[in-house]
């Protein structure tokens, strides 16, 4: 059995760890609520833009738009959205597993330090990495999105895909690959997005006049909507990060509390054994003196 001094040191260490994990849990819970609010706040705006695209879909010629042009996939373009810090359970590991399943040539753009480190460590073609704050401002996310979209338009990559953690609820985050470009067509793209947002079908048969033309409006609107769509994925990934960190820190705090109870019991047993041993030694010495 360990000495009471060693047990006291372990108890102190576990108490410090529990205090730290509790603080991290509270911070993550606060950030999680803000991230969830930001993700939900952007949905009505995205749905309104989907309605606008739906109104355009039947009035334009989609064959010549560069974002709708399909070509042979030689090099994939992948945006990997991970966390900047650890302590978030298996969140990043699940994303890295999807990356390792990509066997075809690919160029990677990373958001988050953990993703950039993994891609560099595994000798993958990392062309750029970016960092995004907890508030996830659109200006910061727009830079990596436009960088990857420009690679697609230049022909350097033939697809644009996003690997991120989809937020379902506080306890469940799903690591998925989301294809973004090339778009199959505007109608399918809008239908898919509206289905994800839980909105019904949209149809507008009114005769509209677009200035300067419907094709020009689509050319201006579609790239911006792609940026906004990927931004919504990043918001979901940020909500997943804080949720996973809160759950991981709560689990660590609960484990520390349980371990603290076991150590306290062990300490009491060791102290009782030491007291009993002293009593026995005193009794033996008294008996020896009497005899």
Image (spheres, rainbow, N blue to C red):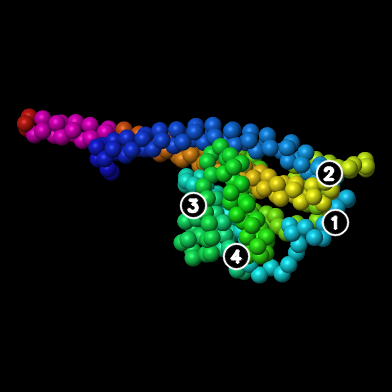
The mark that comes first in sequence, 2 or 4, is 4
Indicate the secondary structure of the residue bearing disc 4.
strand
Q: Which of 83 and 224 is in front in this view?
A: 224
Which range of residues does the magenta coloring cover?
Answer: 270-288
In the picture of the structure, the residue carrying the numbered disc 2 is 211
In the picture of the structure, the residue carrying the numbered disc 1 is 61
92 versus 139 height, above or below: below
Residue under the point 49% across and 65% down: 123
Q: Contact (CB < 8 A) between labels 4 and 3?
A: no
Query: Which quadrant, please, contains the N terminus?
Result: top left
In the picture of the structure, the residue carrying the numbered disc 4 is 106
Is 132 displayed left or right of 157 in the figure? left
In the picture of the structure, the residue carrying the numbered disc 3 is 114
State the image quarter where residue 7 is shown: top left
The mark that comes first in sequence, 2 or 3, is 3
The mark that comes first in sequence, 4 or 1, is 1
How far, Cα to Cα, is label 2 from label 4? 39 Å
How far, Cα to Cα, is label 1 from label 2? 16 Å
The mark that comes first in sequence, 4 or 3, is 4
Indicate the secondary structure of the residue bearing disc 3.
helix
């Amino acid at each position: 059995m360990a000495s009471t001094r060693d047990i006291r040191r372990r108890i102190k260490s576990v108490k410090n760890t529990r205090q730290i994990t509790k603080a991290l849990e509270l911070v993550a819970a606060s950030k999680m609520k803000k991230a969830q609010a930001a993700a939900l706040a952007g949905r009505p705006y995205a749905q309104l833009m989907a309605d606008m695209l739906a109104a355009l879909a039947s009035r334009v010629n989609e064959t010549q738009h560069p974002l709708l042009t399909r070509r042979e996939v030689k090099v994939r373009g992948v945006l990997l959205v991970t966390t900047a810090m650890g302590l978030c359970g298996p969140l990043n590991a699940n994303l890295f597993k999807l990356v390792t399943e990509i066997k075809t040539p690919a160029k990677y753009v990373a958001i988050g330090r953990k993703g950039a480190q993994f891609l560099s460590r595994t000798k993958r073609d990392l062309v750029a990495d970016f960092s995004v704050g907890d508030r996830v401002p659109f200006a910061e996310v727009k830079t990596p999105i436009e960088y990857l979209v420009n690679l697609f338009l230049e022909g350097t990559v033939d697809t644009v895909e996003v690997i991120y953690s989809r937020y379902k609820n506080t306890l469940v985050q799903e690591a998925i690959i989301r294809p973004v470009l090339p778009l199959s067509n505007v109608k399918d793209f809008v239908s898919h997005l509206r289905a994800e947002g839980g909105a019904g079908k949209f149809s507008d048969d009114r005769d509209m006049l677009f200035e300067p033309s419907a094709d020009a409006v689509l050319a201006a609107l579609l790239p911006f909507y792609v940026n906004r769509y990927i931004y919504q994925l990043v918001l979901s990934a940020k909500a997943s990060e804080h949720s996973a960190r809160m759950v991981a820190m709560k689990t660590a705090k609960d484990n520390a509390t349980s371990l603290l109870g076991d150590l306290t019991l062990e300490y009491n047993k060791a102290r009782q054994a030491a007291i009993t041993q002293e009593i026995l030694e005193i009794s033996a010495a008294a008996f020896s003196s009497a005899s």
